[in-house]
Image (tube, rainbow, N blue to C red):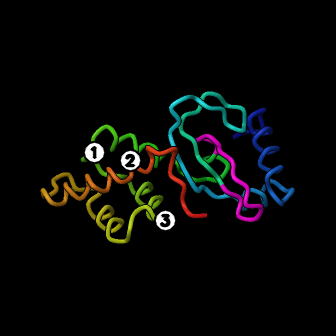
């Protein structure tokens, strides 16, 4: 984000929820802990409306949480949450499609995929022709992820 109105508002709100008073230090206090898609458009703390791809961030020092839009989390934390949302949309459209590497890592890091599911997903991500058993497992993993996202969003460990 540039130094426009939205950035200024985002910066003010994040600093108010942070221990640090310096923007670069305060940014390091925050991490992405949850994502969800909203049924109704919401407003980001930067003032941007409408947003439907919502990212919950947590301050590891103050223990405060807030929600920001997908683009703010990308620009503010440097995380490519847009790639996770892209994967979710792809598997929602076709349950037999693979999650992408970013989504696989995101859900594994947050304990939503176990080590076997993580390895399986990474190993079969680029495969187009899966055996019936592999396809069944991919579907089960995708359904698991969609079920988690379907509830007000996925809230990972802090």
How far apart marks 2 and 1 lie (CA) works out to 9 Å
Residue 11 in the figure: left or right of residue 129:
right
Residue 147 in the figure: left or right of residue 98:
right
Q: Residue at x 44, y 56 (%)?
A: 102
Q: Tell me residue 62's x, y (percent).
A: 77, 61
- Placement of the N terminus among the 4 image quadrants: top right
Disc 3 secondary structure class: helix
Q: Is residue 121 magenta?
A: no
How far apart marks 3 and 1 lie (CA) works out to 22 Å
Q: In this rendering, which labeled residue sits more in front, label 2 or label 1?
A: 2
Q: Earlier in the sequence, mark 3 or mark 1?
A: 1
Q: Residue at x 55, y 29 (%)?
A: 40
Q: Foreground residue, 19 or 78?
A: 19
Q: Which corner quadrant of the image does residue 33 belong to?
A: bottom right
- Furthest-bottom residue in this view: 115
Residue 117 in the figure: left or right of residue 131:
right
Q: Tell me residue 57's x, y (percent).
A: 64, 52
Q: Which corner quadrant of the image does residue 43 belong to?
A: top right
Mark 2 closeness class: few <14, some 14–19, many ≥20 residues within 10 Å: some
How many marks can you see?
3
Q: Which residue is mark 2?
A: 146
Q: Which residue is mark 1?
A: 95
The stretch of residues the image draws in magenta is: 58-72
- Furthest-right residue in this view: 21
Disc 1 secondary structure class: loop
Q: Which corner quadrant of the image does residue 118 belong to?
A: bottom left
Q: Which residue is mark 3?
A: 109
Say if mark 2 contacts mark 1, CB within 8 Å: yes
Q: Residue at x 27, y 45 (%)?
A: 95
- Placement of the C terminus among the 4 image quadrants: bottom right
């Amino acid at each position: 984000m540039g130094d426009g109105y939205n950035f200024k508002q985002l910066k003010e709100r994040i600093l108010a929820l942070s221990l640090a008073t310096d923007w670069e230090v305060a940014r390091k206090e925050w991490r992405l802990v949850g994502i969800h898609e909203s049924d109704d458009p919401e407003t980001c703390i930067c003032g941007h409306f409408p947003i439907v791809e919502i990212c919950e961030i947590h301050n590891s020092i103050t223990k405060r949480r807030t929600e920001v839009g997908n683009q703010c989390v990308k620009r503010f934390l440097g995380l490519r949450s847009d790639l996770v949302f892209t994967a979710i949309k792809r598997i929602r459209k076709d349950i037999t499609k693979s999650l992408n590497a970013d989504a696989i890592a995101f859900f594994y890091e947050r304990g939503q995929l176990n080590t076997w599911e993580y390895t399986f997903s990474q190993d079969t991500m680029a495969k187009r022709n899966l055996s019936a058993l592999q396809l069944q497992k991919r579907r089960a993993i995708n359904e698991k992820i969609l079920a988690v996202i379907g509830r007000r969003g996925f809230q990972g460990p802090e």
